Structure formats: structure tokens, C-alpha cells
Image: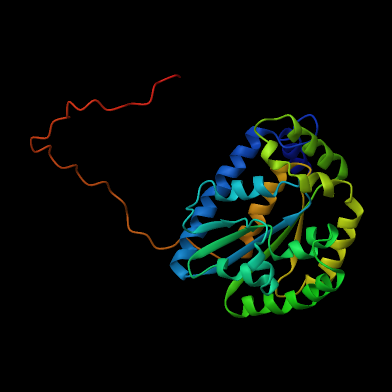
Amino acid sequence: MNAKARKKAASAAAPNGKLKRKAYDKELAKLHVELVKLQEWVKYKGLKVCVVFEGRDGAGKGGTIKAITERVSPRVFRVIALPAPTEREKSQMYVQRYLPHLPAAGEVVIFDRSWYNRAGVERVMGFCTEEMAQKFLKAVPLVEKAMVDSGVILIKYWLEVSPEEQTRRLESRIDDGRKIWKLSPMDLKSYSRWYEYSRARDEMFKATDTGFAPWHMARSDDKRRARLNIISHLLGQIPYKSAPREKVKLPKRQKPGGYREPDYPFKFVKERF
């Protein structure tokens, strides 16, 4: 980074070194334009894109996914966040319940946690046996190879947060009425097992970081920087251009043709603001 770039980065940083809101919003707006271009290209070319988000509790997966999807169509960018498996799903092949959600042509599917639950929370919290976890780690590269061979563009992200920042974020959820839904009993149980999760993560990377479906790690102590970096990286993983589009012009409205507003007493929302 040259002196000019360092000066620009410093001016965009808050006193604690994190990215200022104004600089973040400016860059995010630019990236949103590119995400819309990507969306139209995916539809035009019939691409099948699957994006997996994993990471530690409080690492910012949900906020990153929201930043990606807030300006695109939910019909193209679908977010999948599956609940705990039912008894029937528990009896299926492990990845079976995820397969129906994989993208069809013209879709981008984002998994907010995925089949990798087995390599992380299920393994650490004892929801599966060690034998089941090892079988999963051996099998998942084969499953992902089949996905890629079928034409799916598979992109995997791991968000990494420091112990100190994770503590701060989880504590902030305890008394904030806007965030209490983010703090589950499982978060509290898993919080104390930092190094067990570290070991599980390391073994997962070793077994599933492949040439056809590599892992991409993002530091997320600064959530704004992480979001911008991930979106920029995501755009770089999928070659795209501006899709052909006809010039849009609003047509003239029809004449009223004798229509009059009815006397019916519409029940308008009370204006409080």
C-alpha cells in the first residue's frame, strides 16, 4: 500500500480503527450496483451459484448475508437457514435435506450455515458421534465434486472473529431487545468451547479445502470491512458482464374514463410520525 492509499484508508477509519459508516455506505452502494449486474447475468446465462457461510457464533454471517441481499431480488438470491432436523430428516442420508435447496438455473442460493453443521456444532456439542463426523469429512468432498460437476458454482466462506470481539458481541445481545433472538441456548453452551471449535475447524479445512471447492476465510472483527471484502471477493469469483437489456420508458397512463374515487371509508393507517 502506497502513502496515498494509506492516507485514504486512515481517513475512512473510525478512532478505534474500524471503517466509518459514511465510507462503508459509499463503497457498499457501489458493490450493490455490481451485485445487481451479477444477478441479471446469472439469470441471462442460467448460472447456478451456491454460497456457503460458516463461522463462529457472533462472527457476522447474518449481517454479511443481509448486506449481499438487501438490493437484489429474493427470487434470484435465495437465503436458506434450515432449523434443527426433524426425526424423519435425522434418519436420512446426512446431506439429503440440503440437496433440494441447491440452485437451479438462474439462481444464487446462500446457505446461512449448511451441511458443515456436522463438522462444527454437531461434532463439538455431541449431537453426532466421532465416527459420524469422520465419515462426513470423507464423504463431503465427493458430494461437493458432484455439485461442481453438475455446473454449480460453489463458494465457501468462513468468518473468523477474535475471542474478545465474540464476547463483546454476545454480551451486547443479552439486554438488547433487537438482538435477543440472536442469542440461543446453544450459543451459550458453545461459547466456552472456543478451542474445541478451533480444532474442529482446522480438521474440517484440512479435509474439505479442495481445488474445486476451496474455503475462503474473512476476518470479521470489523464487520463493515468484512462485508465489503466478502462481497468484493464474491463478485470476483463469478465472471459476469452487463446482461443485454432493452431501454426502459414508462408508458402513458390511461385516461380516467369516468372513474371517480369512491365514498367508501378506507381505513388508513394512523399517522404517528
The quadrant of the picture occupied by the C terminus is: top left
- Closer to the camera, 81 or 164? 81
Q: Position of residue 96 (x, y in %)?
A: 63, 72
Q: Position of residue 164 (x, y in %)?
A: 87, 40
- The way the protein has been coloured in the rendering is rainbow
Task: Count numbered badges in the picture.
Answer: 0
Task: Say whether residue 210 is left or right of residue 193.
Answer: left
**Residue drawn at (69%, 67%) of the image:** 90
Q: Residue furthest left?
A: 258
Task: Say whether residue 99 is left or right of residue 203.
Answer: left
Task: Say whether residue 8 is left or right of residue 67.
Answer: right
- Closer to the camera, 211 or 179? 179
Task: Say whether residue 101 is left or right of residue 226.
Answer: left
Res. 171 in view: yes
**Residue drawn at (66%, 73%) of the image:** 92
Asked which quadrant contains residue 6, the reply is top right
Res. 1 in view: no
